[in-house]
Amino acid sequence: GAGVSQSPRYKVAKRGQDVALRCDPISGHVSLFWYQQALGQGPEFLTYFQNEAQLDKSGLPSDRFFAERPEGSVSTLKIQRTQQEDSAVYLCASSPLWRTASTNEKLFFGSGTQLSVL
Amino acid sequence: TQLLEQSPQFLSIQEGENLTVYCNSSSVFSSLQWYRQEPGEGPVLLVTVVTGGEVKKLKRLTFQFGDARKDSSLHITAAQTGDTGLYLCAGLNTGGFKTIFGAGTRLFVKA
């Protein structure tokens, strides 16, 4: 596709439900990032994939959060037993380059999934 | 942990006015980026500054990277209503893979 696609656009979950958020990156992009953006805040890093390898998951808030990218393209962020504090916009970003310690290339963001936990 | 602090948090101005927003850190960054985010959308990259003291211009927007590479500023000349949005600065976390973001400056330009 032309850009990063995220689905669903909006998700309402009851507390305790499991949710799965999908990200379709730009075709051929090697790097994929997930961010969490609370209302009125900047994006907070969750995890990073280089192709299918999850190289950094230091930002995942708890073991209820799990991300995968099994074939190096589409990624899914799963949140188990959702809590009210999980309510936020979840952003996915991709980049055509490998992330190194010195590169800070352009990230292409999707429009996000707005998760509301009631 | 490296932090990026942005100021002001919120700015409301009239069309035609000039403004400057700031991004500061106690840490050195190899580069800093500025993104703009509109409601309901993801951030879009405006510029990357790499060299200390560097100034980049993008139409009415002027970006500067501090000499010590710890801070950056964004100056908008003759603001337009289309400039309304959340302006985020971002930097690469040292030794890691993550791009970290500031909390942003929310700009509202009134007609």
Image (cartoon, coloured by chain):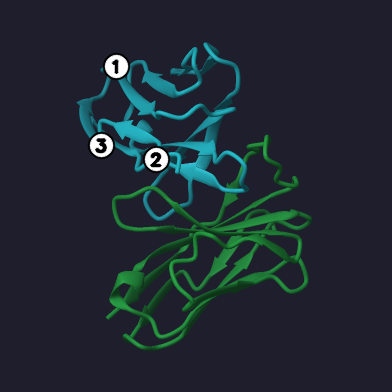
Give the image quarter of residue B13: top left
- Secondary element under disc 1, as helix, strand or loop, is loop
**Disc 3 element:** loop
The spot of residue B72 in percent (x, y) is 43, 22
Label 3 crowd bin: few (<14), some (14–19), many (20+), radius 10 Å: some
The picture quadrant where one finds residue A57 is bottom right
Q: What residue type is labelled 2?
A: Gly
Vertical placement of residue A63 versus A33, above or below: below
| Left/right of residue B42 with respect to residue B49 in the rendered view | left
Q: In this view, does B110 lie to the left or right of A105?
A: left
Local crowd size for mark 1, using a 10 Å CA cut-off: few (<14), some (14–19), many (≥20)? some
Which residue is label 1 attached to?
B18
Chain colored cyan = B
Residue type pointed to by label 1 = Asn
> Which residue is found at the position 29% from the left and 75% from the top?
A84
* Residue with the mark numbered 2: B102
In space, the residues marked 2 and 1 are separated at their CA atoms by: 22 Å
**Decide: marks 2, 3 in contact (CB < 8 A)?**
no
Classify B107 as above or below B20. below
Mark on residue A44?
none
Residue position for label 3? B9
Residue B96 vs A71, above or below: the answer is above
Q: Which chain is green?
A: A
Which one is in front, A13 or B23? B23
